[in-house]
Amino acid sequence: MEKTKKFLLPENELPTKWYNIMADMPTKPMPMLHPGTRQPITAEDLYPLFAKGLADQEMNSTDAWIEIPEEVREKYKIYRPTPLVRAYNLEKALDTPAHIYFKNESVSPVGSHKLNSALAQAYYCKEAGVTNVTTETGAGQWGTAMAFASKAFGLELAVYMVKISYEQKPYRRSLMQTWGAQVIPSPSMSTKAGRKIITEHPNYQGSLGTAISEAIELAMSTPNCKYTLGSVLNHVSMHQTVIGLEAEKQMEMAGEYPDVVIGCFGGGSNFSGISFPFLRHNIKDGKKTRFISAEPASCPKLTRGVFQYDFGDEAGYTPLIPMYTLGHNFAPANIHAGGLRYHGAGTIVSQLMKDNLMEAVDIKQLDSFKAGVLFAQTEGIVPAPESAHAIAAAINEALKAKEEGTKKTILFNLSGHGLVDMTAYDQYLAGDLVNYSLTDEDIAANIAELEKIIK
């Protein structure tokens, strides 16, 4: 009898509510602070920047379940529920007793999980009567998702795309433009923040922190305009829990429960999405699942950063966030996993990390591409460079199971495909990519600079 490889939920099994882990956390995260007063922010403080519905969700620490609006659920039905797949061929190639499953978020129209929050954010902006939105994007996955969602809800979008990714990933830019967005390489001359950085560092290739500063500045200076964000913040992580909520039911269909749950890590959106619904069973029911975030070795905020208040952007426009950080002025290496080149982690993930409810590993660039190629050759899907970090971590766990001779059930989130990242694979296959490493001295110097700003 042929083994079942793919587990599909019917459309009527689409989650009707998002899961808000803040309500169940043993230790609530420290509050974000107003950048001017340094006092805890309120939802009202966020209204000038975000749509009211999103600001209210950001500050909600009491309701575990938040209703998904019907208009958003209808849009989700374009591609959700997404498949859960047993990676039999990868298991065979590794000769491991481990069972490896992946949640395939690459099937969305934009090729990644980012659409789960983009549609929600566009909906709440439209509901608030907003006509224009701004955002930033690293590798371009969030920008493409927001471009699609903005068009779906009749909004005009401006995207500040990190300059190195704007140059490395022209087809992501093309996708955004195809869906009607304006795309600006960041840093740019169109904002005060951008002009300052270009003046001080003329050859600077950009960072997510810089792009966020520019997008916020444009939003705050444009009538009837709001800012949208693809990761880090609480409401973004909550929107992504549709991933894990579906995976729960699909793992039941497979007759298994994960011992390990893995997601790549930039700001925390896809890791949160796959992890939080399962993590609630550790918190509430005593389950012992391990949760592993896989970040790039060149941007190791969880594995080598410090926990303290820091800005979410380079110019200091955002609230001060209690986070694991390398410093908001950290200039990451120009790796191809552009979506993971962010200096800090969100408040929820940082608190979970502080409380030892999750783990973090760092993955070298060449190891991530090696894992991505093996996955493509065994499972037929070319993964995004970001997702390849989760695959590398899953492979490491599967090989440990082989060494130990133990059966282990591993679940990871395939957050996106790499079909518009083939330039990166070209360079890897040609031997032109390298690993980037940070010395302890480099990190200490950057964090010492941060200490002068925030006591």
Image (spheres, rainbow, N blue to C red):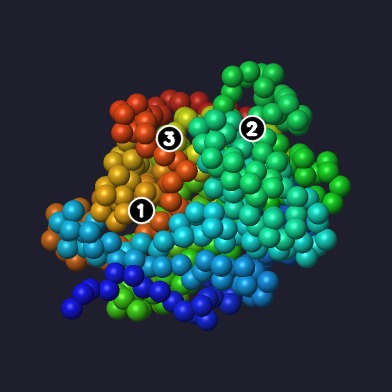
- Residue 381 numbered tag: 1
Q: Earlier in the sequence, mark 3 or mark 1?
A: 1
Residue 179 to residue 193: above or below: below
At label 3, which amino acid type do we have? Answer: Thr
On residue 423, which mark appears?
3
> Which residue reaches farthest front?
178
Q: Which residue is mark 2?
A: 185
* Circle 3 or circle 2, nearest the eye: 3
Name the spot of residue 44 as percent of width and height, x first.
79, 58
How many numbered callouts? 3
Residue 322, visible in the rendered structure: no
**Which residue sits at x=83%, y=43%?**
222
Look at the image and tell me whether residue 420 can be seen.
yes
In the rendered view, does 17 fall on the left or right side of 273?
A: right
**Do residues under tags 1 and 2 come within 8 Å of each other at their CB atoms?**
no
Give the side of residue 369 with respect to residue 92, left or right: right
Q: Residues within 10 Å of mark 3 (few under 14, many from 20)?
A: some
Give SS at disc 3.
helix
In the image, 62 versus 96, the foreground residue is 96
Give the camera-side residue of 141 and 244.
Answer: 141
* Residue that appears at 41% across and 58% down: 413
What is the x, y in percent for residue 163?
A: 59, 31
Residue located at (61% from left, 72% from top): 73
